[in-house]
Amino acid sequence: MHGHGGYDSDFSDDEHGGQSSKKKKRTVEDDFLLTKPFQKEKHGKVAHKQVAAELLDREEARNRRFHLIAMDAYQRHTKFVNDYILYYGGKREDFKRLGENDKTDLDVIRENHRFLWNDEDETDMTWEKRLAKKYYDKLFKEYCIADLSRYKENKFGFRWRIEKEVISGKGQFFCGNKYCDEKEGLKSWEVNFGYIEHGEKRNALVKLRLCQECSFKLNFHHRRKEIKAKKRKAKIKTDGEESSHKKSRISSAEEATTRKDDGHSSSKKSEGSLHRDSDEEGNASESELWKGALPETDEKSQ
């Protein structure tokens, strides 16, 4: 009896153990299915080592980012250099920057500038050439500014005007010499400017406005072509001839209209005289009718 009883009790314990393990499995599966996306894992009271390391790394990265953003560009550069020397070794002199090959925008424009741009010059445009072309498009290419400091050597420098010079009138209403601001006695000159640019010889016709002294400097070796205001006079003459032609046309038209008016007036006068004659004849017939007997009229039968 005891043996059977003991057997029954052992069997019942196994059954209870199997049921409890099934319950545990069910709870783990249910927890896995019920977990939400991006839900943090459940830990005990003490944080796991990996979680603590991730939190520390995040906090450190946040602090480092905050300090880097607060720094200037130069301060950030020095910090990176110091960190590199600290971790990898080396000398600080190796990181000194050489400014020999540094170029500003003005240096690039001076190297790639052209007095006149042709279609051939605009082929194979690099960013340096595009920058120089952009500067060239902003210049005003009507009158030139001249450098006459080396006029005795027959060497002259010419450049186009910028916006400030156009607004102030330099080169048009003031003398076009770089070092002269004379207003009176200005003359216009046309100069064949020969120059060497990027190893290529070129020519360009330019216009200058110079005072008497600067004109003497320009024509020191040989006389240049002076642009006079003949074209304006010719235009004035042509305008006068056109006005005289217009006047003659207007006068001829007026004469024709007066002739037409005379013809109309004569026709009107003749019409008026005819009307007057007809009125007089009607008055005369009426008086004759009243004087004598009534004229006999033949009454027609029906």
Image (cartoon, rainbow, N blue to C red):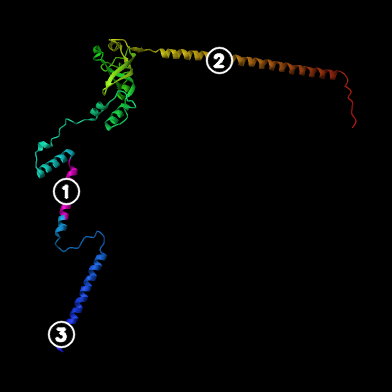
**In the displayed structure image, the side of residue 99 where residue 114 appears, left or right:** right
Whether residue 170 is visible to the viewer of this picture, yes or no, is: no
- Pointer 2: residues within 10 angstroms few (<14), some, or many (20+)? few
Q: Nearer the viewer, residue 269 or 85?
A: 85
Mark 1: which amino acid? Asn
User: To which residue does mark 2 refer?
Assistant: 249
**In the displayed structure image, the side of residue 175 where residue 71 appears, left or right:** left
In reply to whether residue 68 is colored magenta, the answer given is yes
Label 3, label 1: how far apart the Cα atoms are: 68 Å
Label 3, label 2: how far apart the Cα atoms are: 148 Å
Task: Please state, as top left, top right, bottom left or bottom right, where the N terminus lies in the image.
Answer: bottom left
User: To which residue does mark 3 refer?
Assistant: 6
Q: Quadrant of residue 48?
A: bottom left
Task: Please state, as top left, top right, bottom left or bottom right, where the C terminus lies in the image.
Answer: top right
Task: Give the magenta part as a residue range.
Answer: 54-71
User: To which residue does mark 1 refer?
Assistant: 63
Q: Nearer the viewer, residue 257 or 130?
A: 130
Mark 3: which amino acid? Gly
